[in-house]
Image (spheres, rainbow, N blue to C red):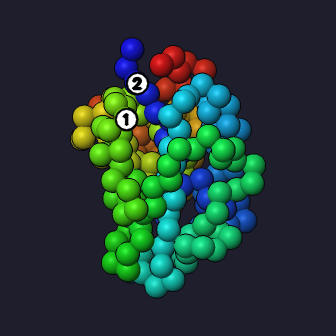
Amino acid sequence: MKKSALFIVDVQNDFLPGGALAVPSGDRVIDPINRLQERFEMILASKDWHPAKTVHFDRWPVHCVRGTEGARFPSALKIDKIKQVFLKGTGESDDGYSAFEATNEDLEAYLKIHGIERLYITGLATDYCVKATALDAAAAGFETFIVRDAVRAVNLNPGDETKAMEIMQRAGVKIILSKDLNH
Ligand code: VGL
């Protein structure tokens, strides 16, 4: 049996409806993620953890400034089983889309030390941080899955979500539904 981890990308208040950079229906990922957590021992998460001033905010509204309410996990998300949170976008000149760019902990090293070979990725947003994290995971040699009912896209341009899914699939990432997950 390959050892698996559930990875929760950026499920933070600012990415939910009403937040500073709301992902449409972003809150809909919470229930499936909570349910999936019952089926994993190794549960990891990332957070956007920006300084108040960063080049990232030239491109995006101010969001997920470290230490603020917008950067917190929503209260509906189950967090007691999360073993490690990877903080990214922490510099003034980096976007930090991928959880593999985390600066508090090296995600690739962490996964290798814990013998994880297979990564099930959930969270926000499909066309940015989920995509960047999945592409880095596949490139680093992890068997990588996107749990389709547990991710949502920003879709700044219509079709961004479809495009992101295609790019990930071309890179070897597999797209599955929670109900078909059998790790
Ligand atoms: C994200 C846009 C800007 C994400 C972060 O978490 O997907 N998207 N910053």
Residue 174 x, y percent position in the rendering: 39, 28
Toward the right, the furthest residue is 76
Residue 158 appears in view: no
Label 1: element kind: loop
Give the amino acid type for the residue marked by disc 2 in the picture: Lys
Q: Say which residue appears at 50% left-offset and 53% top-offset.
A: 85
Upstream in the sequence, badge 1 or badge 2? 2
Residue 88 x, y percent position in the rendering: 42, 63
Residue 19 x, y percent position in the rendering: 67, 67
Q: CB under 8 Å between callouts 1 and 2?
A: yes
The quadrant of the image that shows the N terminus is top left
Give the amino acid type for the residue marked by disc 1 in the picture: His
Q: Quadrant of residue 167?
A: top left
The residue beneath circle 2 is 3
> Where 150 falls versus 133 (above or below)?
above
Q: Which mark is residue 15?
A: none
> Where 120 falls versus 181 (above or below)?
below
> Where 33 falls versus 106 (above or below)?
above
Q: Say which residue appears at 50% left-offset and 34% top-offset.
A: 42
Who is closer to the viewer here, 35 or 41?
A: 41
The residue beneath circle 1 is 114
Q: Report crowding for label 2: few under 14, some 14 to 19, many 20 or more residues within 10 A (C-alpha).
A: some
Who is closer to the viewer here, 150 or 1?
A: 1
Residue 72 x, y percent position in the rendering: 64, 63
Note whether ligand 1 is within 8 Å of mark 1.
Answer: no
